[in-house]
Amino acid sequence: MRAGPGEMATRAWSLLHRAADAMTRCEGEALRAAGLSPQQFALLAAVRSLPVPVTQKKIADRLDRRANSVTALLNRMERDGLVKRSSDLRDRRTVRITLTPRGEEALERGRKIASELPPVVMLDFSGKEVRELVRLLERVRANTRFLTGLKKKLGAVEALGLPPVLGSQG
């Protein structure tokens, strides 16, 4: 008996989670040599790649994280001397995030380590397979971001007393 589309989607979903967990463990073990966690490395890379001024909201958006989880990570990283927070001179409500020299060094060590992992993990993938995987994962990411945004909007509509949609009830 063949699995239906819903069953295959559930299997794909489960495999994506398991693959992400395995990659995070692998990356975590490798990045430990640079004194970083995967989350710290991702945040440092985001700060480096975002247009100035870099704000907590921009970081959260880039990392697909909630602002409060980015706040907690920034607190630890600031304490460890990897990032610095400062008030924006034009808008005192805005807090700019910059890398410290120690953060810059950690990012470079992390980049060297992290750049070695993908070619090893995908050693037996053809170029065509890698391009197809990227294309499919970009679609998954776009679809999940769309649904997250839609659920937020629907949640606001439901607050007006309309029936819940897409499992967005609290």
Image (cartoon, rainbow, N blue to C red):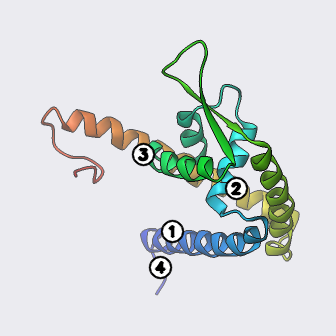
Q: Earlier in the sequence, mark 3 or mark 4?
A: 4
Q: Nearer the viewer, mark 3 or mark 4?
A: 3
Question: Can you give x and y, in whole percent of width and height, for residue 89 in the image?
Answer: 61, 15
Nearest the viewer among 98 and 46 is 98
Sort mark 3 into few (<14), some (14-19) or many (20+) by Cα contacts within 10 Å: few
Sort mark 2 into few (<14), some (14-19) or many (20+) by Cα contacts within 10 Å: many
Q: Earlier in the sequence, mark 2 or mark 1?
A: 1
Vertical arrangement, residue 56 with respect to residue 66, above or below? above
Question: Residue lying furthest top in this view?
Answer: 90
Q: Can see residue 65? A: no
Q: Which residue is mark 2?
A: 41
**Disc 2 and disc 1: Cα gap in Å?**
25 Å
Q: Which residue is mark 3?
A: 148
Q: Nearer the viewer, mark 3 or mark 2?
A: 2
Question: Can you give x and y, in whole percent of width and height, for residue 59 in the image?
Answer: 59, 40
Nearest the viewer among 53 and 105 is 105
Q: Which residue is mark 1?
A: 13
**Callouts 3 and 4 close, C-beta under 8 Å:** no
Vertical arrangement, residue 149 with respect to residue 16, above or below? above
Q: Earlier in the sequence, mark 2 or mark 4?
A: 4
Sort mark 4 into few (<14), some (14-19) or many (20+) by Cα contacts within 10 Å: few
Q: Which residue is mark 4?
A: 3
Q: Earlier in the sequence, mark 1 or mark 4?
A: 4
Q: Amino acid under label 3?
A: Thr
Q: Amino acid under label 4?
A: Ala
**Callouts 2 and 1 close, C-beta under 8 Å:** no
**Callouts 1 and 3 close, C-beta under 8 Å:** no
Q: Earlier in the sequence, mark 3 or mark 2?
A: 2
